[in-house]
Amino acid sequence: MICVTIYDGSRTSIVKAGKDISMIIDIHTHAWPEKVSQRARENLEKVFGVKLVGDPTLKTLLAYMDKNNIDISAVCGVATKPEQVPPINEWLFSIRSKRIKVFCALHPEYKDWKEELKKIKDSGDGVKLQPEFQDFYIDDEKVLPWYEEMQKFKLPLIFHCGKELSGTMLVRSSPERMSKLMKKFPELKIIAAHFGGFELWDEVKKYLLGKDIYLDTSFFFHFLPIEEIKSMLLAHPEDRLLFGTDFPIVDQKKDIDFLNNLDISENLKERIFFLNARQLLSA
């Protein structure tokens, strides 16, 4: 496949086999401040048993974005302790730019969540929750008021969904629980990462496919037969599919190449690569 990069002064376009892909948005990435990045890398590699693409820093992310012609990446923050919420979010606010969107942190034990959500509404792009590392079920009574507020603010909310890569944790974010949550909060803009439930694909088909919920493609493309992946993509509303990679656990290029080579329409690829995320993020 021949790729030619074109610069028009405002953004990069990639001509792939005659088709102009005018933008790529990665809705699901991670980065840490330089001073804690080495510790974060060691912890991630130990827990998940993987080798990261590079140091989990903003500098590394931007370098890979440049290399892979990615216009925008959304950096997701996770607080494993309540006291981490303010410093994580202040850092995320500071890195936000035209190229970097930020899904900010909350924690179920953080008391000033209402004030924090106001800050996120003004200075961020959404919220990221990681139920396995934060030790709560997504339909716990104690967090339901959060969703009310996010729904009111029209803040997108991305959940880790399904099993963890380590395979050692409880599943607190199953497709069935997600389905119940959607019924309680029908206007909440939910992004279910890992295509709605990593390694819970039958449950995803039963409870989430075809429903009004965003599914991102992180840790989805390489874990099922190609025809099944294609079938699941086609079974979901085309405006509710988002390109995501979970960088730096996965090299963004690996998933870009997979989607480019998948036998689906160019219009659907454009929706997945950027159109849907651009509308969601008003980017």
Image: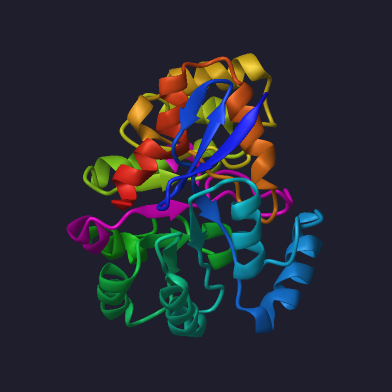
226 relative to 32, above or below: above
- Write down the quadrant of residue 81 in the picture: bottom right
Query: Is 76 or 6 nearer to us in this picture?
Result: 6
Number of on-image labels: 0
**Residue 30 in the image: x percent, y percent?**
58, 61
Q: Is residue 247 visible?
A: no
Query: Where does residue 32 sit, x and y in percent of width and height?
Result: 61, 72
Q: Position of residue 113 (x, y in %)?
A: 32, 76
Left or right: 149 in relation to 160: left
Residue 177 higher or lower than 122, as above or below: above
Colour scheme in the image? rainbow
Q: Is residue 230 magenta?
A: no
Residue found 34% across the figure and 41% down from its top: 180
The answer to which of 55 and 190 lies nearer the viewer is 55
**Helix, strand or loop for the magenta stretch, by majority:** loop
269 or 15: which is nearer to us? Answer: 15
Question: Is 133 situated left or right of 266 in this image?
Answer: right
Residue 282 visible in the current orientation: yes
Along the horizontal axis of the image, is 254 left or right of 90? right
Residue beneath the point at 60% across and 68% down: 58
Q: Is residue 153 above or below residue 35?
A: above
Q: Residue at x 67, y 56 (%)?
A: 248
Q: Which residues are magenta?
A: 149-177
Outermost residue toward the left in this view: 152
